[in-house]
Structure formats: structure tokens, C-alpha cells
Amino acid sequence: MRDSDGLKQKLHEALSSVLPIAAIVAILCFTIAPVPTDLMLSFVIGSSLLIVGLGLFMYGSDNSVAKIGAHIGATLTKSRNLFLILTLSFILGVIVTIAEPDLQVLAKNVPHINTMVLILTVSLGVGLFLMLCLMRILLGIQLKWLLILFYILIFILAALSDPNYLSVAFDAGGVTTGPMTSPFIIALGIGVASIRSDKNAEADSFGLVALCSVGPILAVLILGFFYPGEMSEIAAASASTYLNTVQLSHDYLRAIPVYLGEVALALAPIIVFFLLFQFFMLRLRRTPFMQILVGLGFTYIGLVVFLTGVNVGFSSLGVILGGVLAEGSKKVLLLPIVGAMGWFIISAEPAVHTLTRQVEEISAGSISKKSLKLSLSVGIAVAMMLALIRVLSGISILWFVLPGYILSLALSFFVPPIFTAIAFDSGGVASGPMSATFMLPLAMGVCQTVGGNILTDAFGIVAMVAMMPLITIQTMGAISVIRKKKFKPAVIPMPAEHFTENDVIELWL
């Protein structure tokens, strides 16, 4: 019964994430942005598959990958073997990231880097930085100093790198903190943090996602210095036309075997690693072992259905719709439309509810869930509009992310460290499945119509979305600190002679 309820909840969360965008698209297509009927029907089918696939995937991931991370983290901490912890964390970081659906979608839409080359590059970046994350936890190094160091390095490399790799690199950092990678990394970090017994151990378990998103940015920037990029077709741009419903169904049916094979290759390393770990170290009992295997089955089926819906019908309409909206006088509606999409994307994102509850607890109620959700909605709406301004104007992404990250890192000196960790982790919450699967193709469509450079102008929208929570949540944290100082009750000391030896004195901290 519990499993049935859990699956229903995940399907409801997936519906809440996809439905607002689908509804806005439908309104636009039936009013100011006409598209061919066959493409609209394909979009409806793709959206349905996306909802079902995402729900099955999230359910399976929670019951397999997240549990594997928790078991492995607990087992490794018992070993107290630093070399073993770091080696296995690197391997796990690589193989889990390879199966990340958001990364799969982004990689297929990058025209000048081979899909597998980009996936492996990003995965290696996550693996290396997951090792660094665990070292930070074990040594108790403050997150902000590492973030400052590595973002300085990022912007030095960015100033020297090929502009065609710049926006893709920042997007790569955003898509790696998705529904596959984040639960695993967080579970592993909590397990390793249990080695320490000091009061800051739990707080230091936050921030893993933040650092792991830095690795892919550096890895792709470095790749740009020696990889000979060759232009190829963008997956989202290959929208098919259909004469009848039979042709439409054949397009979906032809895609399923392709993704069955691709997803099997992506998940195979995780399954093999888990089976080996189970045999040599973990030795779970039959029931939890079988539950994880069943969860991996749900993950596999969900990922196949998700990628089929995204690549055949969902993303391709985003390109078409973006192109239609960028024509003539309709261009003036682009900013409010993408702003509205940003508002509803973050409002419907399931992980936002967890984040807002977490911040409310940490701030002892001084930052309410309602105020935080409002600030996030405003922030993501602004991020979407700024991203479209980039597409329309051709301004380099550095003019946006450099001031944004400088402000974010400056705020880290004025808020409690836990707020900085949660703020940087929350970038993955904002840059959820909708950013890579629809908003990026929409930006590509706009960019093609206005004659811009897709590589430098359209890419970067995921990075802009991932950046805004860093500013929003830390700003809310700074406000919380100011309020606490402002309303802190004054303590008036009583002279010692006013008390006798029989008085009871209560000390309040």
C-alpha cells in the first residue's frame, strides 16, 4: 500500500511540474502562436509520456539510487578507509551522472560536441568533485572558501576559452544536479558526515551538490581548449511532420528501441557496481536487496519513457514555438511569456516544497515558506527574462553570471554558513527537468529566428536559472540575521547585592 501511495505521489509531482508549461503552450498555440496540428498532437503525447516517465523515474530513483547511496555511505564510513571512500565516491559520481536524464537531454542538443564525449566529460567532473566534497566534510573546510577559489578559476578559464563552449559549460553545471544525481550525492554525504561527531558535521553535509556542479563547468571549459568541435544536428530541432496518426505512432515506436538500448548502457554501470558491492561488502538481506532491484527497474522504464516523450514530441515543439513567437510584433510578448513560464516552473517544482520547509526550520520560522517561494518565483521569472534578453541581444553570458556569482559569494560573508550551502545546493532545485527539456529548445527557436548564434546565445538559460536561488536564499538569510539582531531582547544585569544566597538565578542564553 505504501509503495502504491509513493508511486501516486511521484506521478502527481511529475504532473505538477509538466502541466503548467503544457497549459501555457496550449494557450499560446490556440491564440497567438499557431503551429501545425500534427506537431501539437505529438506535443500532447510527448507531454503525457514525460509525466508518466518522470513519475516512474523519480519513484524508482528514490527506491534504488538514493538507497544505494545511503547504504554505500554508511558502509564506507564504518571502514574508516579514506582511500576506499575517495576511490568509490569517484567511480559512483561518474556512473550515476552518466544516467542523469537532464544531462542526456542537454547532450543531445549540443551540436558541436559528441553526445558521449560531453556526457563522459561532465561525469568525470562530477566524480572528481564528489571526492573533493567528501574530503571537505572529513576535514571540516568551510564551503565558501572552496566556492570562491573554484569560481575564480572558472572565470579565469572562461576569459580564455572558446565562446562556443562557455554557455554550454555553465548549463552543464546546472543539469547535473537533477533527480538522479542529487538524491545519491546527498545520501552519500550524510553517511560520510556521520564519521564526525562535532556540532558542525550535519551542516557540512550540505553543499555537496553545489561543489559537484562546479566540476562539470571546469571540465567542459577545459575540454574546449583541445576538443575539435564539429557541428551536427540538434535533437530538439528535428521536428517531424506527420500526414496521419499512423505515421505519428510509428515515430514514437521507432524511438523506443533506441532509448531502451541507450538507457540500458547508462544504467548498466550502476547495476554492476551495486551487485559487486552487495556481494563483497554490503550483503543486504533479501527483502531490501529485491526492493532496490525493483526500484532500478522502475528507474529504467521511467527513463526510457521520459526520453522518448522529450525527444520525439515535447522539446521539438519548444523550438517551433520559440520561432513563431520571435516573428514580427509578437516578439514584444516574449519576455512576459517566458517570465510567466519561469514563475510557474519553480512554483510547480516538487523539490521546492522540500527546500522551503528546510529553510523555514533552519531559520526558526523567521523565513516563511510562503515568502521564500514568492522570492524564488520572482527570481526564476527574472532569470528567464534575462536569458531571453541575452538571446535577443547576443550579450555574452559572462556579463550576467560574473556579477551574479560575485554577489552570491559576497553574501556568503553575511549569512550563516548553512544558508550558503543550501542556497548553492538549491540551484539544482530550480534548474529542474523543464529547463533543459523545454525552455532551452524554446530559446533555440527564438535564436534561430532572430539570426543569433545558438551556441553563445541560446545556451546558458539553465545556468541563469540555477544562479538565481544563490542570490535569493542568501538574501533571505541576511534579512533573517538582521531581524534577529534588531529584535533581540536586551538583557539588563542585576547588581550582585540584589540577590541573597537563597535566591535561584535562571541563566538564559
Image (cartoon, rainbow, N blue to C red):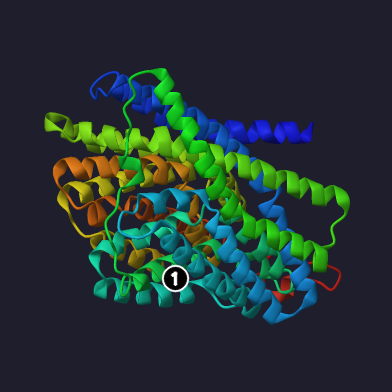
Pick the quarter of the image with the C terminus.
bottom right
> What residue is at 56 percent from the left and 36 percent from the top?
53
With 26 as the anchor, is 185 left or right in this view?
Answer: right
> What residue is at 57 percent from the left and 32 percent from the top?
52
With 444 as the anchor, is 362 left or right in this view?
Answer: right
* Image coordinates for residue 287, horizontal then vertical, percent: 86, 47
Q: Is residue 131 above or below residue 423?
A: below
Name the foreground residue: 234 vs 246.
246
Q: Is residue 105 above or below residue 168?
A: above
Q: What amino acid type should be assigned to the residue bearing mark 1?
A: Phe
> Which corner quadrant of the image does residue 399 belong to?
bottom left
* Image coordinates for residue 358, horizontal then vertical, percent: 60, 51
Residue 170 visible somewhere in the drawing: yes
Kindly identify which residue carries mark 1. Answer: 413
Q: How many marks?
A: 1
> What residue is at 81 percent from the left and 68 percent from the top?
281
> Which corner quadrant of the image does residue 324 belong to?
top left
Q: Residues within 10 Å of mark 1 (few under 14, many from 20)?
A: few
With 366 as the anchor, is 506 left or right in this view?
Answer: right
* Image coordinates for residue 222, horizontal then vertical, percent: 36, 73
Name the foreground residue: 215 vs 225.
225
> Which corner quadrant of the image does residue 87 belong to?
bottom right
Q: Is residue 111 above or below residue 161?
A: above
> What residue is at 70 percent from the left and 36 percent from the top?
6
Residue 369 visible somewhere in the drawing: no
Task: For mark 1, give the secondary structure.
Answer: loop
